[in-house]
Image: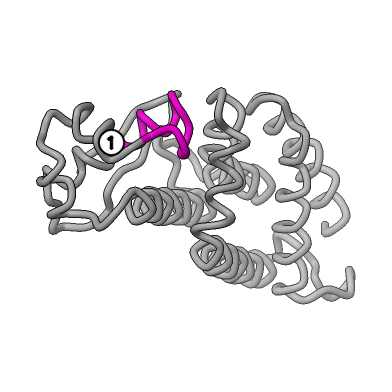
Protein backbone atom coordinates (compact mmCIF):
# COMPACT_ATOMS: atom_id res chain seq x y z
CA UNK A 1 0.00 0.00 0.00
CA UNK A 2 1.49 3.31 -1.09
CA UNK A 3 0.69 6.54 0.70
CA UNK A 4 0.94 10.10 -0.59
CA UNK A 5 1.44 12.67 2.12
CA UNK A 6 1.10 16.35 1.26
CA UNK A 7 -0.59 19.01 3.38
CA UNK A 8 -1.49 16.14 5.78
CA UNK A 9 -3.65 14.51 3.11
CA UNK A 10 -2.99 10.79 2.67
CA UNK A 11 -4.04 8.81 -0.38
CA UNK A 12 -3.57 5.05 -0.12
CA UNK A 13 -3.86 2.96 -3.26
CA UNK A 14 -6.34 0.21 -2.45
CA UNK A 15 -5.47 -2.11 -5.38
CA UNK A 16 -3.24 -5.16 -5.32
CA UNK A 17 -1.63 -4.43 -8.72
CA UNK A 18 0.22 -1.27 -7.72
CA UNK A 19 2.66 0.10 -10.30
CA UNK A 20 5.38 1.87 -8.25
CA UNK A 21 6.32 4.27 -11.06
CA UNK A 22 2.72 5.21 -11.72
CA UNK A 23 2.14 5.86 -8.03
CA UNK A 24 5.34 7.92 -7.83
CA UNK A 25 4.04 10.06 -10.71
CA UNK A 26 0.73 10.58 -8.93
CA UNK A 27 2.48 11.51 -5.68
CA UNK A 28 4.67 14.03 -7.49
CA UNK A 29 1.69 15.46 -9.35
CA UNK A 30 -0.19 15.87 -6.08
CA UNK A 31 2.74 17.84 -4.69
CA UNK A 32 2.96 20.04 -7.78
CA UNK A 33 -0.78 20.73 -7.95
CA UNK A 34 -0.79 21.67 -4.26
CA UNK A 35 2.21 23.99 -4.60
CA UNK A 36 1.47 25.68 -7.91
CA UNK A 37 -2.10 24.85 -8.87
CA UNK A 38 -3.37 22.84 -11.80
CA UNK A 39 -2.95 25.44 -14.56
CA UNK A 40 0.66 26.33 -13.74
CA UNK A 41 1.77 22.71 -13.44
CA UNK A 42 3.08 21.09 -16.61
CA UNK A 43 3.92 17.50 -17.48
CA UNK A 44 7.57 18.60 -17.47
CA UNK A 45 7.19 19.84 -13.89
CA UNK A 46 5.70 16.52 -12.81
CA UNK A 47 8.49 14.62 -14.59
CA UNK A 48 11.18 16.67 -12.82
CA UNK A 49 9.47 16.21 -9.44
CA UNK A 50 9.27 12.47 -10.04
CA UNK A 51 12.85 12.26 -11.28
CA UNK A 52 12.01 10.59 -14.58
CA UNK A 53 11.81 11.66 -18.22
CA UNK A 54 8.76 13.30 -19.71
CA UNK A 55 8.52 10.38 -22.14
CA UNK A 56 8.18 8.05 -19.19
CA UNK A 57 5.33 10.18 -17.84
CA UNK A 58 3.51 9.90 -21.17
CA UNK A 59 3.93 6.12 -21.16
CA UNK A 60 1.66 6.07 -18.11
CA UNK A 61 -0.65 9.07 -18.64
CA UNK A 62 -1.88 10.82 -21.76
CA UNK A 63 -1.88 14.29 -20.16
CA UNK A 64 -2.11 16.09 -16.84
CA UNK A 65 -5.91 15.97 -16.99
CA UNK A 66 -5.71 12.18 -16.83
CA UNK A 67 -3.28 12.43 -13.91
CA UNK A 68 -5.65 14.78 -12.10
CA UNK A 69 -8.58 12.41 -12.65
CA UNK A 70 -6.53 9.48 -11.36
CA UNK A 71 -5.69 11.42 -8.21
CA UNK A 72 -9.33 12.35 -7.72
CA UNK A 73 -10.44 8.75 -8.22
CA UNK A 74 -7.86 7.49 -5.71
CA UNK A 75 -8.96 9.99 -3.08
CA UNK A 76 -12.63 9.15 -3.59
CA UNK A 77 -11.94 5.44 -3.23
CA UNK A 78 -9.84 6.04 -0.14
CA UNK A 79 -12.38 8.22 1.60
CA UNK A 80 -15.32 5.95 0.76
CA UNK A 81 -13.50 2.93 2.14
CA UNK A 82 -12.51 4.75 5.32
CA UNK A 83 -16.01 6.15 5.82
CA UNK A 84 -17.59 2.71 5.48
CA UNK A 85 -15.12 1.30 8.01
CA UNK A 86 -15.98 4.05 10.51
CA UNK A 87 -19.70 3.38 10.11
CA UNK A 88 -19.05 -0.26 10.95
CA UNK A 89 -17.16 0.81 14.05
CA UNK A 90 -13.76 -0.16 12.68
CA UNK A 91 -11.71 2.59 14.32
CA UNK A 92 -7.98 2.67 13.42
CA UNK A 93 -7.16 2.92 17.13
CA UNK A 94 -9.33 -0.08 17.99
CA UNK A 95 -11.25 -0.04 21.25
CA UNK A 96 -14.90 -0.49 22.10
CA UNK A 97 -17.78 -0.06 19.68
CA UNK A 98 -18.80 3.62 19.58
CA UNK A 99 -22.32 5.02 19.56
CA UNK A 100 -24.07 5.60 16.24
CA UNK A 101 -23.68 9.40 16.31
CA UNK A 102 -19.95 9.03 16.92
CA UNK A 103 -19.60 6.52 14.10
CA UNK A 104 -21.47 8.77 11.69
CA UNK A 105 -19.39 11.80 12.69
CA UNK A 106 -16.17 9.84 12.17
CA UNK A 107 -17.45 8.60 8.81
CA UNK A 108 -18.28 12.12 7.64
CA UNK A 109 -14.85 13.35 8.66
CA UNK A 110 -13.22 10.41 6.88
CA UNK A 111 -15.27 11.07 3.76
CA UNK A 112 -15.03 14.86 3.48
CA UNK A 113 -12.04 15.83 5.65
CA UNK A 114 -9.28 15.05 3.12
CA UNK A 115 -11.00 17.07 0.38
CA UNK A 116 -11.47 19.96 2.80
CA UNK A 117 -7.77 19.84 3.67
CA UNK A 118 -6.81 20.18 0.02
CA UNK A 119 -9.11 23.17 -0.45
CA UNK A 120 -8.19 25.01 2.75
CA UNK A 121 -4.48 24.22 3.15
CA UNK A 122 -3.24 24.82 -0.38
CA UNK A 123 -2.91 28.37 -1.68
CA UNK A 124 -4.48 27.00 -4.87
CA UNK A 125 -7.32 25.17 -3.14
CA UNK A 126 -10.07 27.08 -4.91
CA UNK A 127 -8.55 26.37 -8.31
CA UNK A 128 -8.12 22.69 -7.48
CA UNK A 129 -11.75 22.56 -6.33
CA UNK A 130 -12.93 24.15 -9.58
CA UNK A 131 -10.81 21.83 -11.71
CA UNK A 132 -12.12 18.84 -9.81
CA UNK A 133 -15.68 19.87 -10.66
CA UNK A 134 -14.73 20.51 -14.29
CA UNK A 135 -12.67 17.38 -14.94
CA UNK A 136 -14.12 14.93 -12.44
CA UNK A 137 -17.81 15.75 -12.19
CA UNK A 138 -18.76 12.17 -13.04
CA UNK A 139 -16.44 10.80 -10.36
CA UNK A 140 -17.83 13.21 -7.79
CA UNK A 141 -21.44 12.30 -8.61
CA UNK A 142 -20.73 8.59 -8.50
CA UNK A 143 -18.92 8.81 -5.17
CA UNK A 144 -21.73 10.91 -3.67
CA UNK A 145 -24.28 8.29 -4.70
CA UNK A 146 -22.14 5.47 -3.32
CA UNK A 147 -21.60 7.25 -0.02
CA UNK A 148 -25.30 7.93 0.36
CA UNK A 149 -25.96 4.24 -0.26
CA UNK A 150 -23.38 3.31 2.38
CA UNK A 151 -25.08 5.68 4.83
CA UNK A 152 -28.51 4.22 4.04
CA UNK A 153 -27.25 0.70 4.74
CA UNK A 154 -25.85 1.87 8.08
CA UNK A 155 -29.13 3.57 8.98
CA UNK A 156 -31.10 0.40 8.22
CA UNK A 157 -28.79 -1.58 10.48
CA UNK A 158 -29.08 1.06 13.22
CA UNK A 159 -32.87 0.95 12.98
CA UNK A 160 -32.93 -2.84 13.31
CA UNK A 161 -30.61 -2.60 16.31
CA UNK A 162 -32.87 -0.03 17.99
CA UNK A 163 -30.28 2.75 17.87
CA UNK A 164 -32.70 5.05 16.03
CA UNK A 165 -36.46 5.11 15.53
CA UNK A 166 -37.16 5.83 11.88
CA UNK A 167 -40.87 5.11 12.15
CA UNK A 168 -41.41 7.68 14.88
CA UNK A 169 -39.51 10.27 12.85
CA UNK A 170 -41.48 9.45 9.70
CA UNK A 171 -38.29 8.90 7.71
CA UNK A 172 -36.79 6.10 5.67
CA UNK A 173 -33.18 4.96 5.93
CA UNK A 174 -32.47 6.43 2.49
CA UNK A 175 -34.17 9.69 3.50
CA UNK A 176 -32.02 9.97 6.61
CA UNK A 177 -28.91 9.19 4.57
CA UNK A 178 -29.76 11.94 2.10
CA UNK A 179 -30.28 14.51 4.86
CA UNK A 180 -27.01 13.61 6.57
CA UNK A 181 -25.12 13.74 3.30
CA UNK A 182 -26.58 17.05 2.15
CA UNK A 183 -26.06 18.55 5.60
CA UNK A 184 -22.38 17.60 5.64
CA UNK A 185 -21.83 18.94 2.13
CA UNK A 186 -23.40 22.24 3.15
CA UNK A 187 -21.26 22.52 6.28
CA UNK A 188 -18.11 22.53 4.15
CA UNK A 189 -19.10 25.81 2.54
CA UNK A 190 -17.18 28.76 3.91
CA UNK A 191 -15.27 26.70 6.48
CA UNK A 192 -11.80 28.32 6.66
CA UNK A 193 -10.10 25.17 7.90
CA UNK A 194 -10.71 21.53 8.75
CA UNK A 195 -11.05 22.27 12.47
CA UNK A 196 -14.02 24.55 11.80
CA UNK A 197 -15.59 21.93 9.54
CA UNK A 198 -15.19 19.25 12.24
CA UNK A 199 -16.73 21.53 14.86
CA UNK A 200 -19.73 22.17 12.62
CA UNK A 201 -20.09 18.46 11.92
CA UNK A 202 -20.07 17.58 15.60
CA UNK A 203 -22.91 19.97 16.40
CA UNK A 204 -24.90 18.89 13.36
CA UNK A 205 -24.62 15.17 14.11
CA UNK A 206 -25.49 15.60 17.79
CA UNK A 207 -28.62 17.61 17.03
CA UNK A 208 -29.65 15.36 14.13
CA UNK A 209 -29.49 12.08 16.05
CA UNK A 210 -31.07 13.54 19.15
CA UNK A 211 -34.22 13.78 17.03
CA UNK A 212 -34.08 10.12 15.99
CA UNK A 213 -33.92 8.54 19.44
Asked if the magenta segment contains residue 145, the reply would be no
Q: Report crowding for label 1: few under 14, some 14 to 19, many 20 or more residues within 10 A (C-alpha).
A: many
The image shows residue 208 at horizontal and vertical percentages of 82, 51
Q: Which residues are magenta?
A: 28-41
- Residue denoted by label 1: 27
Q: Is residue 72 left or right of 146 when viewed as pictured?
A: left
Say how many tags the image has.
1
Give the quarter of the figure containing the N terminus: top left
Q: Main secondary structure of the magenta part?
A: helix
Asked if the magenta segment contains residue 31, the reply would be yes
Q: Where is 101 relative to 3, above or below? A: below
Q: Using the rendered view, name the quadrant where residue 33 is placed.
A: top left
Q: SS class of the residue under badge 1?
A: helix
The image shows residue 191 at horizontal and vertical percentages of 74, 31
Give the quarter of the figure containing the C terminus: bottom right
The image shows residue 43 at horizontal and vertical percentages of 27, 40
Please state which of residues 42 and 139 is positioned toward the viewer in this rendering. Answer: 42
Amino acid sequence: MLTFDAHNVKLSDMRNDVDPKREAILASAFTQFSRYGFRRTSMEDIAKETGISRASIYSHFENKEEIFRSLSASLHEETLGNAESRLKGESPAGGAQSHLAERVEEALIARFGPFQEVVTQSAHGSEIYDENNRLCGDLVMDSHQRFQSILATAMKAASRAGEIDLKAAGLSASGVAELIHLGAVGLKQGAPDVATFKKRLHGFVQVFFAGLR
